[in-house]
Amino acid sequence: MSYINNVRMFVRVFELGSMSAAARDMHVSPAVASSRIGELEKHLGIRLFNRTTRTIQPTEQGSIFYPGARKMLEAMEVAEAAVHEVTNTPRGSIFISAPLGIGRRLIAPLIPEFHETYPEIHVRLRLSDRPLNITGEGLDLAFILGQLPNSEMRLKNLLDCPRILCASPSYLNCRGEPKQGADLQHGKHDCLLLQFPGSSENRWVLQTAEGKQSFAVGGPFTSDDGDVLVNWALEHHGIINAPLFDVVDHLLSGDLVAICTATPPSNVHLACLFPHRRYQDPKIRLFLKFVSARLKAYLKDKSSQYATHMQNG
């Protein structure tokens, strides 16, 4: 087992590019991480990394060793998963990521319930609105909300989520209520955008009688956190284009008001992305089945509440 642990440590150091980061990821001290790499190097009779006080870089031998080491660990995971599936005792860890909003509101509350059902499966959750390198981060699966990427990863589309344009009553009383996409352009309104390095959200696509149309929008504030945008809208700073589940409670309370309802934004896809190998793992399939069923029920209920609210005026 010590040899396997040493190989696992090597793989994480290689992928994260940092001894200390790999140590944190493996829940050991940097000294233990360094010792494991040293033991592996001694066993192989080669140097795997060139170290300085500030950097660590794989040697040529380390780069050659990495693909085989990764495949060995993956083969062990598949073998262990098969044994656990036969014995009906799925166990081990799942490392997942999700966007901030959906992670906080939808995914995180389900994890304790999942763990109660499958107590031998431990879930590690990372929340970020920024795209993550699934392989580099060592993720088993990543929830994504938005444009589905072209990827060599396996993709499971879970459901389509309606989006909605909304703002606070105070903002609309002050600035007027836009009725169509053209009313949002050319600085006529402050549109609050989700932006981060590499993103390009400066156009909103609305569903019109002529089909989908794109409108250039902008405003004084942007953020890489969807919850920040919702809070700014609640504080009367502008209009947001948000998934319905993010704002439905504020719409029901009247703190936010839907606008441009005749030309709503295009739906946003909620999907899960993961390496092909991980779908063979029964605990991954169990987690996806569990989460998917509860998300669909939750979003159906929220959409029904909002539809009833709109009918009652």
Image (tube, rainbow, N blue to C red):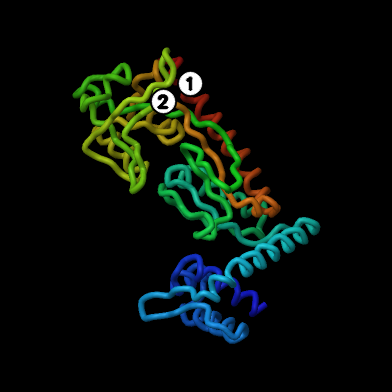
Q: Are marks 1 and 2 in contact (CB under 8 Å)?
A: no
Q: Is residue 239 left or right of residue 14?
A: left
Question: Within 10 angstroms of label 2, few (less than 14), some, or many (20 or more) residues?
Answer: many
Residue lying farthest left? 174
Q: Earlier in the sequence, mark 1 or mark 2?
A: 2
**In the image, what residue occupies the spot 26% across and 33% down?**
218
Query: Under tag 1, what secondary structure?
Result: helix
Q: Position of residue 239 (x, y in %)?
A: 29, 30
**In the image, what residue occupies the spot 37% across and 41% down?**
226
The answer to whether 240 is drawn above or below residue 15 in the figure is: above
Q: Position of residue 4 (x, y in %)?
A: 64, 75
Residue indicated by mark 2:
265
Q: Quadrant location of residue 194?
A: top left
Of the pair 105 and 27, the residue shown nearer to us:
27
Q: Position of residue 120 (x, y in %)?
A: 67, 60
Foreground label between 1 and 2: 2
Of the pair 115 and 288, the residue shown nearer to us:
288
Q: Quadrant location of residue 42?
A: bottom right
Query: Under tag 2, what secondary structure?
Result: loop
Amino acid type at circle 1 is: Ala
Q: The C terminus lies in which quarter of the figure?
A: top left
Q: Position of residue 40 (x, y in %)?
A: 59, 81
Q: Is residue 170 left or right of residue 126?
A: left
Residue 307 badge: 1
| Cα–Cα span, label 1 and label 2 | 16 Å
Q: Quadrant location of residue 94?
A: bottom right
Amino acid type at circle 2 is: Pro
Of the pair 18 and 170, the residue shown nearer to us:
18
**In the image, what residue occupies the spot 39% across and 33% down?**
242
